[in-house]
Image (tube, rainbow, N blue to C red):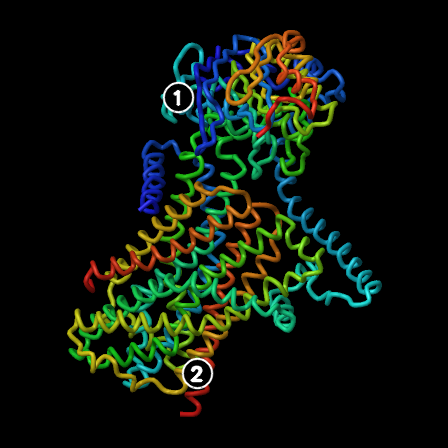
Amino acid sequence: MEFVGGIAVVLLQALRATLRRSLDVEQLREGLIRLGLHSLPVVFGTALFVGGIMVIQSAPLMTRYGAHSLLGWGAGFGILREIGPILTGLMISGRVGSNNTAELGTLQVTEQINGLRALAIDPADYLVAPRVLSILVTTVVGTLLSMAVALVGAALTGQALLGVHPITFWNGLTGGMLSWGDVAHGMVKAFVFGLVIAGTSTAYGLRAKGGAPGVGRAVNESVVLSAVAIFVTDALISFASRGN
Amino acid sequence: MIEFRGVSKSFGDKVILDGVDLTAGSGEILFVIGTSGAGKSVLIQHVVGLLRPDAGRVLVDGEDVTDYDEHRFYEVRKKCALVFQHATLFDSMTCAENVALPLRKHFRLKGDEALRRAEEFLALVQMERFGATYPSALGDGLRKRVAVARALTLSPRYILFDEPTTSLDPVSARRVDALIVDLARRQGATCVVVSHDLRSIFSIADRVAMLYKGRVRALGTPQAIRDTTDPIVRQFIEGRNEGPLETT
Amino acid sequence: MTDDPKGTTHWSAGPLPQAPEPEMGGSAAGSFPAGPAPTGSSPSGSSPSGSSVPLREGFSERPEERSQRALASSEIARSATLDSQVTIADPMPGFVLPADEARGGPLHTLAAALYATTRMEPGAVAEQMNQLGIRSLGFVCLVLGFVGGILVYQAGIQALRIVPDTSTIGPAYIEILVRDLAASLTALMLATRVGAGIAAEIGSMKVTDQLDALRLSSADPVVHLVAPRLVASVLVTPLLTILGGAVALLTGTLTGLWVFDISLHTFLDARYVDAADLCAGLLKSVAFGLAIPVMSAHAGLYTSGGSQGVGNATTRAVVGSSLAVIVLGFVIGALVEVLAGGAG
């Protein structure tokens, strides 16, 4: 519960700073570049392989039913609704979330956050809000793009391994059983995961204490809790939306 | 004027401050001395709200700031600058960017303009050559000077120095002393200096307060401190190992 | 406009860039009587455009300087190795000095760790197995439990969209669990939990010079820290995979029973599972168990630069381990698929 409380405080601070427009725009821009743009390669690399894995995993089913036309649907469904958002979330948590915790933790244990406060600069405006926004945007945009990349990976693997032509794959994907609703479902998840990652990593970074080992500990706890929170919220959203 | 009235602070069951009464008058250089762990740094952090007292009041300009929330403290912090013991520069920024940050945030200066002004403040502490250097590439003494320049950007009327000469070579230490005198005498700033540098104490202080066991043990001019008969104060200023003074 | 910081006081120079020179010099000289003569306005301060150039230079120079320094220190360390090998009769195998680590990639760390397994202390592996296993058990079970439930739920809803037949959900789910899901998900969780832990632990020791202290007491950090974690992870990962898989099977079965009314008998049917699936699953979990500690220990041994460095090492460990799991999962999956497909 302390965990949920810490996240809530961070997110509220970020929301207030955004609404009052007191957040530091330069830090936001830097955050979007450093946390967002620079993690795209890792996210894309993951997505490409994940698409391949989805095809390999659905291969026996497809072969069993001789239903190659369904490959696009099978892989697409998993990528758009479940695996895409979850794996992108996990990678962003690993790359961006842990980086964020490490940086904030370092600022905390070296008293640089108190340094900001002593200069009458609100850490909520200068550190918290820009980072929360950057991570949220990164997760949502990264998930959307990685869905596309994962579908490409799936189509390529399907052709290489199962001899399914990309057009057949594409037809399976757009054949009517998948809709924009599935994409929207994935995006809702991405938004929630973004909040979870941003809140957890920021809260744990700000709470770090005890020098270098303390920063390591904070990062460790933050990635683990983000991962658990991603799976738990994923389950909640999936059940709540009842296949919609 | 900065006043502490019966300020007490404990961390867990460890009592650090146990009813400190102390006043720093306008334009004076007040030294707070004491052994390591006596609570000197803890005391001055109460002025800017980085720590809150368990009991007692803190007054700045006669205004009771004890119960201010974080937001109202920002106004206090604009007139009370704190120079941290370890300088606490932002290590992701160059020295000039460090000094420019409060200028950008509080005077809404644009990036280039703020950097130019930052160079002027760096020049005040003879650090203008290091504007483009990162703090991690500088030694302790140089970093502290940058921290002073950063603190001066807000034109504070009160400046709290946390061990400004500790870990500095003797020459740099005397330069920092000269800077403090300059700020107090020429600019009329009130300087509260936490220190155990005996040379600074006896060369530039107007008054000296010694903290011992969470209270003010002695308070007076450097001459009065030098002439005191209190065995604990004597042991401290003479730097003797043997004596009644208990260290934590 | 309140943008004149000097408006209320007289700290320093006036607002004009040209004006301050004399007053600035005077004030500075007053502050530091013994100091070097003020250089006047520095080149970077003279114009707004000029001021940004040196900043950028300074920024870009930093990493280079650092790598140069690292190179220089590696030279020193290497010559030190040679010396010690010449002078000491029974040399410590010099395979894993820090300078060597910094030049090798993760594969180098893997080779060093495998070589070091021959010289481990007997109790070390058991202790690490205990640490890794106990610390991760609850976490792995929790996550796999949730995933099991979600997957069966989603699969059931999709299956019902096409054919009103839920009888193949169970067997298909069990197959996918055995051949991939249990191993991959367990490993992804271990990549965050164990990977971050190993990197933070070794990284903290590195930045606080404890690794050098180990070396000075003739204890090879790879033998004492990396090898036991490697062996423990290879042994524990398959066990955790089996446990996690069992939990996922349990929650999946319950979801099938409660949501779709699939009987236990219909659901718990392993007819699709064949030898290739078992091989793929087992191979993956062993490979993941090897990859995670290697990537993480490598990140930890590489750590430089204080608390920030420890955090960065942890990040690299999590990302590196997760990527290794995903890529290895793909490669092994494709390999088994091609081989089994060719055989059958």
Q: Is residue C76 left or right of residue A64?
A: right
Is C150 drawn above or below residue B182 in the view shown? below
Residue C159: in sight, yes or no? yes
| Residue at the spot 67% in from the left edge and 26% down from the top edge | B127
Return the mark for residue B55: 1
**Which residue is disc 2 drawn over?**
C279
The residue positioned 71% from the left and 15% from the top of the image is C29
The secondary element bearing badge 2 is classed as helix
Height in image: C277 above or below C253?
A: below
Q: Residue at x 53, y 48 (%)?
A: A213
Q: Report the amino acid beneath label 1.
A: Ala
Which residue lies at the image location 49% right of the left edge and 73% below the top edge? C235
Question: In x, y percent, where is residue B94?
Answer: 60, 35
**Relative image position of residue A40 (x, y in whole percent):** 46, 56
Q: Is C133 situated left or right of B172 in this image?
A: left
What chain does badge 1 belong to? B
Task: Tell which residue pokes out farthest to the bottom in this image.
Answer: C344
**Quarter residue C94 falls in:** bottom right
